[in-house]
Amino acid sequence: MKHLPTYEVWLVTGSQHLYGEETLRQVAQHAETLAKALHDSALIPVQVCYKPVVKTPEEITQVCLDANSSKACVGIITWMHTFSPAKMWIHGLNLLQKPLLHWHTQFNRDIPFAQIDMDFMNLNQSAHGDREFAHLLTKMNYRRKTVVGHWQDTEVHERIGVWARVAVAKASWQGMKIARFGDNMREVAVTDGDKVAAQMKFGFSVNTHPVGDLVRYIHRVSDDQIQALIEAYQASYKMALGLLTERRESLIEAARIEAGITQFLEEGGFEAFTNTFEDLHGMRQLPGIASQRLMAQGYGYGGEGDWKTAAMVRAMKVMATGLPGGNSFMEDYTYHFDPTNEMVLGSHMLEICPSISSGPVSCEVHPLGIGGKEDPVRLVFNGDPGPAINVSLVDMGDRFRLIVNAVQAVEITEKFPKLPTARVLWKPLPSMKEGLKQWLIAGGAHHTVYSQNLTVEYLEDFANMLDLELIVIQ
């Protein structure tokens, strides 16, 4: 993934010529100071760029067009330092294609009671200048995030930082390619959907590639590539007894598959992929450790052809770049209905990202009862406790819906001697029964993206930017 500092958000400050050149000069100085403060903030991971103060409809339109054409710019922050008549903004806003954050702030923190005069009042008018601008945004039904607070306020930086991360994730979907090896699992409803409608709305494309094409890449993997991956496995994970000796052939084949998929994705410019155990022709194993490790590197992944979840895994990994904790493809597998300790076991047969564990990760090989292939290699571990969210993107036929459930993961104290998978235990909020019921009523998928480092706010911003129907359960 690209480093977030390679992206920009632009601070665009509104004013007008009414107040004279001296006032406009001070407005520009103040705006530069605010942009630098945001740029230097550790809570905002992208570059914040000052743009010259806009004072006319023509200047506003031009900066919106410039933002649209800039590959680095992922959104603009607007602030009305003085009163900027909002009709000037209509044409530019109608053309703007990047996300917008309306920042309601002012340069001075306090009222200078002893010194305040009309010159000060003419310069510092954001209290009503931003109201004029916000009225127009609301009248236009313009989608935006609104952040209120002084520019030195840490909470303000946090809110802007969240929005900036989400803006990068939205940008990452524009032109993103998802490789679908085979179709979705036969007869399954929720993993299917309208890929054309998705590309029109979200910007990413989903196309199927024959497994045979992937197999050719797998067969071309060299012994040196395989050995390098096995050494990486040994350096990163606890190797199960016998995996490097009598079961070494399984390990070699798993490494061969990982190297082949990686090369296919890199050469094709793909940032997410899916596969299905019903279509593995020419492959000796289902890609277990390969899918897990590629997710850990930032690729989106969805099992059983689930391209919508693959897209969300990628988007949420982009949002969370550099944050502690992880994001993973996930599935609610089974329930613990003990009335004194209700919780969900989240897992999948193979493909859970090791980024959600800070504990030991074991590399193992075990039989798999479906798929009809050789025993696959996989990473086995317990997910960390703590607050998390589960996220599902579903196709409702005439629209897409984003569903978010806040959960509390708990420490795993029980042993799973016969379950060789990665797993997490969590308690859905607001309660087990209510959380599950609302998920079912909302039509949420059985596949989700499980995130330890993102909050509901990130997904609220994401839904707002993409005009997505959003349901939050918490």
Image: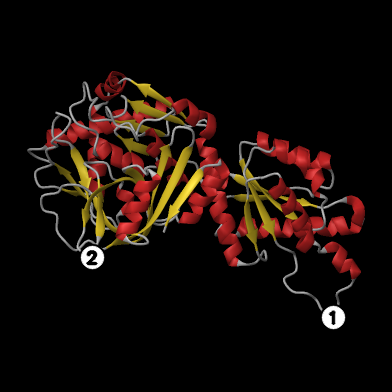
Whether label 2 touches label 1, CB < 8 Å: no
Left or right, residue 37 beside residue 180: right
Q: Earlier in the sequence, mark 2 or mark 1?
A: 1
What residue did someone put label 2 on?
A: 341
Left or right, residue 115 beside residue 325: right
Residue at 66 percent of width and 45 percent of height? 142
Is 66 drawn above or below residue 220 in the view shown? below
Specify the quadrant that holds the C terminus: bottom left
Mark nearer the viewer, 2 or 1: 2
Q: Residues within 10 Å of mark 1 (few under 14, many from 20)?
A: few
Q: Where is residue 364 shown, x and y percent of the image? A: 16, 44
Quadrant of the image occupied by residue 452: bottom left
Where disc 2 sits, the SS reads: loop
Where disc 1 sits, the SS reads: loop
Q: Where is residue 229 shown, x and y percent of the image? A: 26, 38
Amino acid type assigned to the residue bearing label 1 in the image = Ala
Amino acid type assigned to the residue bearing label 2 in the image = Asn
Left or right, residue 150 beside residue 399: right
Distance from Cα at disc 2 to Cα at disc 1: 61 Å
Is 456 drawn above or below residue 276 in the view shown? below
Q: Where is residue 179 shown, x and y percent of the image? A: 38, 28
Furthest toward the bottom, the residue is 114
Question: Do we see residue 341 in this rendering?
Answer: yes
Residue at 40 percent of width and 48 percent of height? 391
Furthest toward the left, the residue is 246
Q: Nearer the viewer, residue 215 or 273?
A: 273
The numbered disc on residue 90 is: none
What residue did someone put label 1 on?
A: 114
